[in-house]
Amino acid sequence: MRIFQYIYYFFRSLYYRGFVNTFKLLSYEGKYEKQLGINTHSIVNLDKLTLAGENSDQNHHYQGASYYILFSIFEKLPIETKNFPLIDYGCGKGRALFVAEQCGFTNLIGVDIAKELIDDANANKAVYVRKNSQSNINFLFEDATKYLIPDNAHVFYFFNPFGEEVLQKVIDNIKESVKQHPRKVYCIYLNPKYKAAFEENGFAVFYTKKNKRYLEGIIYTIQ
């Protein structure tokens, strides 16, 4: 079953991104897994994993976002956000946070509903060599809707980790945090299937990343 998922995503990428961009995505995969010393490859379905909440169609499978896209989009965030908490909802094996640390972010928190994925993330953390020795990286086995947002969190990252219903609950939590502790925050949303959830809740578009026919992601902001 998994091999068919890889084949599907490969041909889907060719269609939407074209050959050149698909080649860039693939070349970055092997390069950065080896360079960072981590193992975040694979597609993992959640149906047989230990979950912190209920299993439903709201919980999407794990798949690491492209290194190529991650590096390009983290570099678009304002430099003043880099020492404040960055929260990765649906962090999986931790790839996005390791890339964010490479891009200069120093306070990184991953939240995932699947215990086995958090275990894998911590195994990667044990071998990953930080670019900044003072960086903090923490992975939490927790339901995203119940996660207590730090008062000074400035960046929130999503790689389409769950359905619209759960996403709305998380957005409500972010908005409440901003209301209680006023600040400007940024939400990175890759593969933005439910982008209307942000746009209908007062978030403004800060940056858009496109490749040929494909909308890779959007950075939203609100304050």
Image (cartoon, rainbow, N blue to C red):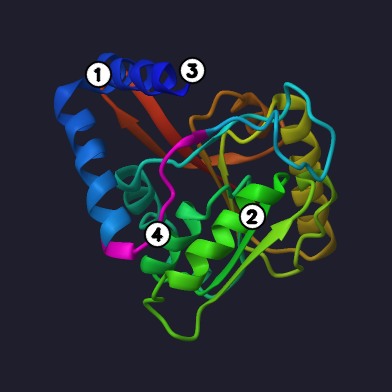
Q: Is disc 3 in contact with disc 1, using a CB cutoff of under 8 Å?
A: no
* Quarter assignment of residue 9: top left
Q: Residue type at mark 1?
A: Leu
Q: Main secondary structure of the magenta part?
A: loop
Q: Residue at x 67, y 65 (%)?
A: 153
- Of labels 3 and 1, the one closer to you: 3
Q: Residue at x 75, y 50 (%)?
A: 174
**Marks 2/1: CA–CA distance:** 31 Å
SS at mark 1 in the image? helix
| Quadrant of the frame with the C terminus | bottom right
Q: Is 17 on the left-hand or right-hand side of 52?
A: left
Q: Which residues are magenta?
A: 35-43
First in residue order: circle 4 vs circle 1: 1
Give the label on residue 118, or none: 2
Q: Is disc 4 in contact with disc 1, using a CB cutoff of under 8 Å?
A: no
First in residue order: circle 2 vs circle 1: 1
Q: Is 101 on the left-hand or right-hand side of 20?
A: right
Q: Nearer the viewer, residue 37 or 27?
A: 37
Q: Tell me if residue 9 comes above or below residue 109 in the rendering.
A: above
Q: Is 59 on the left-hand or right-hand side of 104?
A: right
Kindly identify which residue carries mark 4: 38
**Marks 2/3: CA–CA distance:** 23 Å
* Quarter assignment of residue 139: bottom right
Q: Tell me if residue 54 comes above or below residue 157 in the rendering.
A: above
Kindly identify which residue carries mark 3: 1
Q: Residue type at mark 4?
A: Ile
Q: Residue type at mark 2?
A: Ile
Q: Is disc 2 in contact with disc 4, using a CB cutoff of under 8 Å?
A: no
